[in-house]
Image (tube, rainbow, N blue to C red):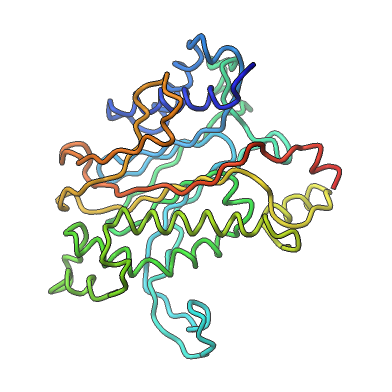
C-alpha cells in the first residue's frame, strides 16, 4: 500500500532542512523537490502541491506550485460603515485598520480542479522550459505590521478574498495591541507609539501573546471555510463560480482539507519572543504535524521575526473529480 501523504511529508521535510541554509524560497523549493526525487521511499508514488515562503532582510520571497495560495496583507486606515465591520446596524462611518492585499499568488492548474503538483517522477531538468508547468516565484518588500497568510485550496475555494480580509480586519487591533504589549511592534514615527498601539484593544485576546492571537485567527478562518462547505445550501463560493465558468453545475463550497498559516512581520530589533514552529527536520518522521515546539529565534537569523501559528482541518479523502462532474 502507498501512503498518499508520505511524499508530501518528506518533500516538506526536505524543504525545511534546506531552509536552514538561509536560501530564498525558489531555491528551497527546487532543492526540496530534487531531494525528494532521490528518496527511495517517495519513488513508490505520490504527489503534492507546494508553497514556500521566506523572509530575507525586508524581502518576502514566495514560491508556489499548485493551488495553495499566499497573500500579504498590509493594514491601513480606511473609512467604512460600521455595519460592514460589526454586527451593529448603524450606517455611521468609522476609520478602521483594513488589511489591504499587497501581493497574492494565483492558482496553477492543468484543467479545472487539477492543480500542478510535484512528484518523484518529475523531469526537473525540463521544469523551466518554455510552456512547462513549473512553480511561480514572487517577491515583495515587507513592513512591520504586515500579515502573511498562507493556506491550502480548502480555504480559497470556500471563502472569497474580501471575506477573508474582513475576518482578519476584526482581529488586527487585538494582534497589533498584543505585539506592542510584548515589545514586538511599535510606530517609531508616532510619539508614544507603543502606547498608541496598545490602546487599540483591551480585549482579553489582546492580552495574550501574538502567537496565540494568530492561532485564534487561523482557527477562525479554518472554521469559517468548513462551515461554508458543510452547508449544502450555500452558494456563491469561489469554487462554485470557477465550476460554472468551466461548464459544471455545482452548488456550495468544496469539501476539502483546510490548512492555514499566519505570520506577523515585526521589526528586526523586536523583543525575542517564543515562536511556534513545526519540527520538519526529520524526513522519516510521520508525526511532524503534531510536533509543535517552542523556540526563541536568534536575532541574526532574520531581519524581522515571524510570529506564526496554524489552523487546520483534515478530511479522510478529498472530493473526487467524478463526484464533481456528476453533480
Quadrant where the N terminus lies?
Answer: top right
- The residue at the point 78 percent across, 56 percent down is 251
Say which of 134 and 165 sits in front: 165
- The residue at the point 27 percent across, 61 percent down is 208
Percent x, y of residue 51: 48, 37
Say which of 289 and 251 sits in front: 289
Say which of 235 and 6 sits in front: 6
Percent x, y of residue 269: 14, 51
Percent x, y of residue 3: 59, 22
Percent x, y of residue 61: 38, 40
Left or right, 219 with respect to 119, comes to left
Left or right, 108 with respect to 11, comes to right
Examine the rendered structure and indicate whether residue 204 appears above or below residue 16.
below
Examine the rendered structure and indicate whether residue 17 appears above or below residue 100.
above
Examine the rendered structure and indicate whether residue 245 appears above or below residue 282.
below
Residue 110 occupies which quadrant of the picture?
top right
Q: How many numbered dots are placed on residues in this image? A: 0
- The residue at the point 22 percent across, 60 percent down is 185
Amino acid at each position: 500500500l502507498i501512503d498518499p501523504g508520505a511524499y508530501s511529508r518528506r518533500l516538506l521535510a526536505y524543504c525545511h532542512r534546506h531552509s536552514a541554509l538561509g536560501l530564498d524560497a525558489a531555491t528551497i523549493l527546487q532543492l526540496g523537490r530534487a531531494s525528494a526525487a532521490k528518496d527511495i521511499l517517495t519513488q513508490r508514488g505520490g504527489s503534492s502541491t507546494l508553497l514556500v515562503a521566506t523572509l530575507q532582510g525586508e524581502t518576502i520571497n514566495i514560491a508556489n506550485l499548485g493551488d495553495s495560495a499566499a497573500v500579504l496583507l498590509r493594514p491601513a486606515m480606511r473609512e467604512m460603515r460600521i455595519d460592514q465591520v460589526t454586527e451593529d446596524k448603524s450606517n455611521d462611518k468609522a476609520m478602521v485598520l483594513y488589511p489591504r492585499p499587497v501581493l497574492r499568488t494565483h492558482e496553477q492548474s492543468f484543467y479545472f480542479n487539477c492543480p500542478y503538483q510535484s512528484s518523484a517522477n518529475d523531469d526537473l531538468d525540463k521544469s523551466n522550459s518554455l510552456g512547462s508547468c513549473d512553480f511561480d516565484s514572487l517577491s515583495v518588500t515587507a513592513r512591520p505590521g504586515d500579515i502573511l497568510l498562507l493556506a491550502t485550496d480548502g480555504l480559497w475555494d470556500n471563502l472569497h478574498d474580501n471575506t477573508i480580509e474582513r475576518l482578519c480586519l476584526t482581529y488586527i487591533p487585538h494582534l497589533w495591541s498584543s505585539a506592542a504589549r510584548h515589545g514586538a511592534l511599535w510606530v517609531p514615527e508616532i510619539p508614544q507609539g507603543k502606547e498608541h498601539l496598545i490602546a487599540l484593544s483591551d480585549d482579553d485576546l489582546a492580552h495574550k501573546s501574538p502567537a496565540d492571537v494568530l492561532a485564534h485567527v487561523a482557527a477562525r478562518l479554518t472554521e469559517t471555510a468548513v462551515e461554508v462547505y458543510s452547508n449544502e445550501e450555500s452558494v456563491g463560493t469561489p469554487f462554485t463560480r470557477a465550476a460554472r465558468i468551466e461548464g459544471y453545475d455545482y452548488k456550495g463550497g468544496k469539501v476539502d482539507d483546510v490548512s492555514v498559516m499566519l505570520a506577523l512581520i515585526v521589526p528586526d530589533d523586536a523583543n525575542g519572543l517564543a515562536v511556534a514552529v513545526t519540527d520538519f527536520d526529520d524526513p522519516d518522521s510521520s508525526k511532524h504535524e503534531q510536533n509543535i515546539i517552542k523556540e526563541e529565534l536568534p536575532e541574526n537569523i532574520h531581519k524581522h521575526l515571524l510570529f506564526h501559528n496554524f489552523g487546520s482541518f483534515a478530511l479522510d479523502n478529498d472530493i473526487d473529480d467524478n463526484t464533481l462532474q456528476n453533480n
